Image: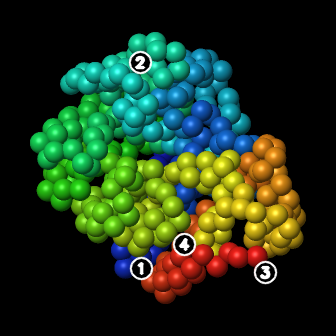
Amino acid sequence: MTDRPRFAFTLHHTDGKARLGEIAMQRGVIRTPAFMPVGTAGTVKAMKPADVRVTGADIILGNTYHLMLRPGAERVARLGGLHAFSGWERPILTDSGGYQVMSLSALTKRSEDGVAFKSHLDGSAHMISPERSIEIQRLLGSDIVMAFDELVPTTSTRDVQEAAMARSMRWAERSRKAFDGGIDHAARAAIFGIQQGALDPDLRGRSAEALKGIGFDGYAVGGLAVGEGQEAMFACLDYAPGMLDEAKPRYLMGVGKPDDIVGAVERGIDMFDCVLPTRSGRNGQAFTWDGPVNIRNAKWAEDLSPIDPDSPIAGWSRAYLHHLVKSNEMLGAMLLTEHNLWFYQQLMASLREAIGAGRLTLWADAFRARYKGQANAPA
């Protein structure tokens, strides 16, 4: 720990709606816009923590649901907390567990108290309430805690969406109280509220007002990137971030593809997380400035060029990566994951540079023209 503040967001520059800033916390500074690699079960898959840092990541995400089931939050606490347990000493944001409870559990029962569910691992019964979610995150030693919320599909009826939003706001208040009750943890950590309301401007506005009334260190735009498509997501982001406190960071949960991130930054989002770069790496897909490359494709079998000459894996050819992936060698997943995380951090660094120079629109238009051109054929 250092003498840095518990949590301080500084906005350095704006370019349209886009924002360049930084978050100072006791475990380190987070440059925004920021992408957080996902460390679901206490690890960013196929990567050592020091190597994640070398890619440029300032913060990673941990998953409350998975860690509460295995190895257990109480066990992690006994072993020194998630930072010491995993070997990552910089900030960690933990999600609330709500999304996984509702997407992975075959049987759930929702009530005002919380969500009762059966583990997807062994069928054992569990209950997560706002208070239990915050307790788990405190036991893990999270630096940024997420309020517990209720997520429903954007295809739900408006009545269902309204009821879930209203309940999420009641749970947000309970989450805030539970967080404040953990005095030692609250003195060094932060808590974010989550805006809900699907694709409805009225519901989003009511959610934002309720969250600001409670007061949080930052605010997430939740309930997007769940199948509604980029056009609908961007239409929501045209107004939703502006409803939140402009002096606090704004986090778009679960996003996403590189062009999703660029469009969301243009609309005022500061923080992102997604499993895509790591999951794609394990499945033979590499992200490049010229679009995604499926390294399994036979056309790469004798291509001696690197994925990117600046990539940390530039010493290995596309032909060799093709061989590794086709042979199911774990080194292929490791190298492609490292490359993808590096690419995402290069993307964020380029966005920050463009915002600071006041040329984001030009940069973003050029990025999209190149990225969507799919100019990744062998030389």
Assign a secondary structure to mark 2: strand
Q: Which mark is residue 161?
A: none
Q: Which mark is residue 379?
A: 3
Measured Cα–Cα span from mark 1 to mark 2: 47 Å
Measured Cα–Cα span from mark 1 to mark 3: 37 Å
* Residue 73 x, y percent position in the rendering: 53, 22
* Residue 120 x, y percent position in the rendering: 48, 23
* Residue 41 x, y percent position in the rendering: 60, 33
Q: Say which label, 2 or 3, has the lower sequence index.
A: 2
Name the amino acid, label 2: Lys
Residue at 81% x, 46% y: name it: 327
Q: Say which label, 3 or 4, has the lower sequence index.
A: 4
Q: Say which label, 1 or 2, has the lower sequence index.
A: 1
Q: Residue under circle 1?
A: 15
- Closer to the observer: label 2 or label 3? 3
Q: Residue under circle 2?
A: 118
Quick check: 139 above or below 358?
above
Q: Nearer the viewer, residue 154 or 215?
A: 154
Q: Are marks 1 and 2 in contact (CB under 8 Å)?
A: no
Q: Say which label, 4 or 1, has the lower sequence index.
A: 1
Measured Cα–Cα span from mark 4 to mark 1: 10 Å
Quick check: 320 above or below 41?
below
Question: Residue 104's image quarter?
Answer: top left
Measured Cα–Cα span from mark 2 to mark 3: 52 Å
Q: Residue under circle 4?
A: 352
- Closer to the observer: label 1 or label 3? 3
Quarter occupied by the C terminus: bottom right
Name the amino acid, label 4: Arg
Give the class, few, some or many, for how many residues have Cα within 10 Å of label 2's Cα (few <14, many ≥20).
some
